[in-house]
Amino acid sequence: MVSAVPVSPTEPAVRRALAEVSDPEIPTVSIVDLGIVERVAVRDDGIHVELLPTFVGCPALDVIRATVEERLADFGRPVEVGFRFDPAWTTDRLTKAGRDGLRRAGIAPPSEGAVGCPFCDSTNVAMDNLFGPTLCRSLFYCRSCRQPFESFKPV
Amino acid sequence: MNDDVRVALDALLLSMADDEFVIGFSDSEWTGVAPMLEEDVAMSSLAQDELGHARALYDLLAQLRDDGRDADAIAYDREPHEYRHCRLVDHGRGDWARTVVRRFLYDTADTVRLDALADASYAPLAELIGKIRREERYHVMHARAWFERLAGHDGEPRRRLEDAVRHLAQDAGTVFADLPGEGALVEAGILNAPMADLHKRWLDQVAARFEAYSLPLPTAPPHPDARHAHTDDFRWLWGEFTSVRRLDPVATW
């Protein structure tokens, strides 16, 4: 994963590196596909990355910051990672690959309409709890394959 | 920003952050002992949301004050009488019905307050509010569902809900207690109406639901001391939430 030869830090190179950083709780989704990478700037004084928290109280932010700093350290420049609320992260920012990655982790992608079971695609599902194990997820039960699953909350 | 606006904005941010902080901590007392597993998860998640909002608001306040004290210092290094949360969230956890009524009153009121700040001319606040509003709608859905569930069931659920409404009636609207210097915030385009107007807006919004369940609408105007006079319940909670910090104030986490 770590490049042997330092790559010069162009913006596309930095974005490619960020695409290798996974969400700390969902290893199948990169932070780029999660849609939280708002801005990347490469300047003489270093690499600046601005990220959008999915939820204001997300406890994973410090871990994400540390992982990004670690991944970008290869470029040999100072790295600054900041968080901002504008624009607000919304579930529309998830990419197609991000939604597929959620399904692979057993999490239904966010949906304002019918929620589909990530295991069997059935929409014959019931919400068990609006709140789940993390701020960003609700709990569902699939009546077709009888499997409980989590669903990303639409925000 | 002139001094009047700065002082009033300081008071606004502190009141909102303390509201979220105190209700968040009270809710977290249900972790492990809620009436059912689903609600254990829900209350823990709500608490985490509120503490996250409190932290973001304390961060804004720390930036505004720029005196070297960070969000943790503001949150934890004060005496109980220096907190500015409203009386509604000042009572102890109580039973499940009281928690449900408190959340319903608070979440509906908080929504009115957030709406009044959505177009704030102070960009850092407007940006944060934009994000918080998207999350709070889940809180309102949860509070409303439980309020209706208890109100609509005769017997013990209904009786306990009525007790809770009676217990909290005097303090129901205290989210909208007068804020020192709030006129300056309205003039500066930060708050879109005085607190007294927001109190009316809120009553208009919740009236139908109280009427539908034949419950007395808690119309009492907020007492001017509503953000200053705290109960013994709060002093106990303060002892809990500052205990670790007081053990070692300079520890890093």
Image (cartoon, coloured by chain):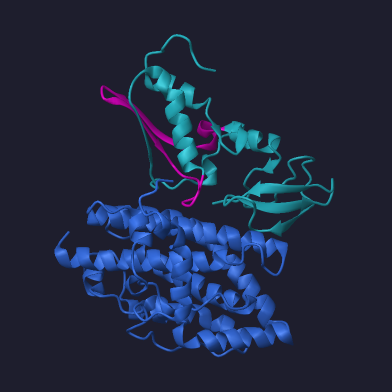
Chain colours: A cyan, B blue
The quarter of the picture where residue B243 lies is bottom left
- The correct choice, above or below, for B26 with respect to B60 in the image is below
Q: Residue at x 36, y 77 (%)?
A: B227
Look at the image and say whether residue A47 sits in the magenta stretch.
yes
- The answer to whether residue B178 is magenta is no
Residue A84 location in percent, x, y? 38, 44
Q: Looking at the image, which residue sits at the far left?
A: B2
Vertical placement of residue B73 versus B174, above or below: above
Residue A77 percent location from the top left of the image: 33, 21
Viewed as shown, does residue B72 lie left or right of A144?
left
Q: Inspect this view and state whether residue B95 appears.
A: yes
Residue at (45, 58) in percent of width and height: B244
- Residue B12 vs residue A11, the one in the foreground: B12
> Can residue B218 be seen in the rendering of this structure?
no
Q: How many marks?
A: 0
Relative side of B151 to B202, left or right:
right
Q: State the residue in front, B206 or B53.
A: B53
The residue depicted at 73 percent of the width and 47 percent of the height is A149
Residue furthest front as drawn: B247
Q: Quadrant of residue A80?
A: top left
Task: Return the x and y of residue B175 as percentages of the image width and height.
Answer: 41, 75
Q: Which residues are magenta?
A: A30-59
**Percent position (x, y) of residue A142?**
79, 50
What residue is rendered at 51% in x and 76% in y?
B105
The vertical placement of A63 against B167, above or below, is above
The N terminus of chain A appears in which quarter of the rendering?
A: top right
Above or below — where is A100 with respect to B40? above
